Amino acid sequence: MSPSHNEEGAPHFTNTPRWKERSPLVRFWRQLQTRRPVTFTDKVRYKMLRDHRPLLVTYADKAAVRDYVASLVGASYLPMEFLITDTPSDIVGRPLPDAFVLKPTHGSGATIVVSAVAPTSTELPRPEWSWVYAHVRPSVADRTQLAAIGEHWLSQLYGQGPNREWAYTQVKPQIIVEELLEGRDGSIPDDYKFFVFHGRVHYIQVDSGRFGNRTQDFYDRDWQHLSLSGGPPWSDEPRAAPARLAEMIDVAQRLAVNTDFVRVDLYHLEDRVVFGELTSYPAGGDSPFIPESWNTTFGLPWTVPKTYE
């Protein structure tokens, strides 16, 4: 199977696209079905099929996007990088801190977080089942097994072939090791996802507790909580606006200057704002909206172009 990333579930993979992903007839049918998009998910699927600009490949590539971010907002917004390689065995002998993050550059949904606050019971996944989020302690982060996980990642084609999440299929597979971003108590910090349409932030998704009691909340740019659910429950207490909200909105809009839509993920630490990733295809075009009416409302600020140039 080819991979279809769903932020609420597991992606699926193959080493080569299925025949129907390469079929001009299937591609024509999908384009016909999406020619008049109305909802947010309709518009994401429209973009997935039609927007083949090199810029989207840069967004998707977790290595190349670092230079893009540095050129627009400055390298100070980037997490520290310890290693980028297409030879996973480089991990074995490379000096690394006790805490770090390991992930592939050519996909989404696969991350190994190594830190002292991980549950004592967690272990590294087997390489063949490693396209997941895993949080482990340094004592179980065996370098040889991490290298095997990296080898497995590099063997996978992410993105359902050239007719769907096209940008990922154009990225050179590598692995990247970056600094672990930590909250005040050493926990994984909240993930702020800014939905930017035509250069302006309209909605903000906040994910908390990725490895624990996960919550998810949506706000408008003025930090008004929205009666919208994407699946996970809301946080128990009203969340105060982050101190650096204005800065994060500014950074997100500057990073989205060249496109009709992109989701900009940022982290708000005590001393700085840090870039996470740029996503053109949230949930692979299958974002859940509860109630469903939000699917249309969410897409209203986005006018898709007739053609992408």
Image (spheres, rainbow, N blue to C red):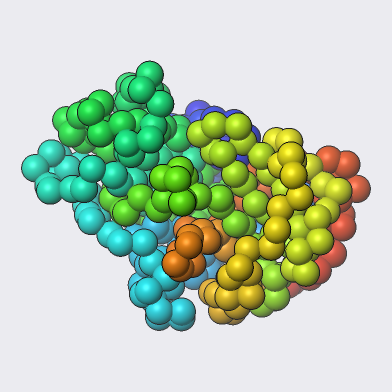
Residue extending farthest top: 121
The image shows residue 123 at horizontal and vertical percentages of 34, 22
On the picture, is 33 further left or further right than 93? right
The image shows residue 201 at horizontal and vertical percentages of 70, 70
On the picture, is 125 further left or further right than 227? left
On the picture, is 111 further left or further right than 261? left
Q: Quadrant of residue 233?
A: top right
Q: Is residue 262 visible?
A: no
The image shows residue 296 at horizontal and vertical percentages of 87, 54
| Viewer-closest of 166 and 294 | 294
| Viewer-closest of 39 and 36 | 39
Compared to 258, does 82 lie above or below? above
Q: Is residue 291 visible?
A: yes
Q: Quadrant of residue 258?
A: bottom right
Residue located 62% across and 36% down the image:
214
Q: Total of numbered circles in the picture?
A: 0
Compared to 114, does 174 lie above or below? below
The image shows residue 22 at horizontal and vertical percentages of 53, 44
Residue located 12% across and 47% down the image:
94
Residue located 88% across and 41% down the image:
291
| Viewer-closest of 306 and 256 | 256
Residue located 76% across and 64% down the image:
223
Residue extending farthest left: 93
> Which quarter shows the C terminus?
bottom right
Residue extending farthest front: 185
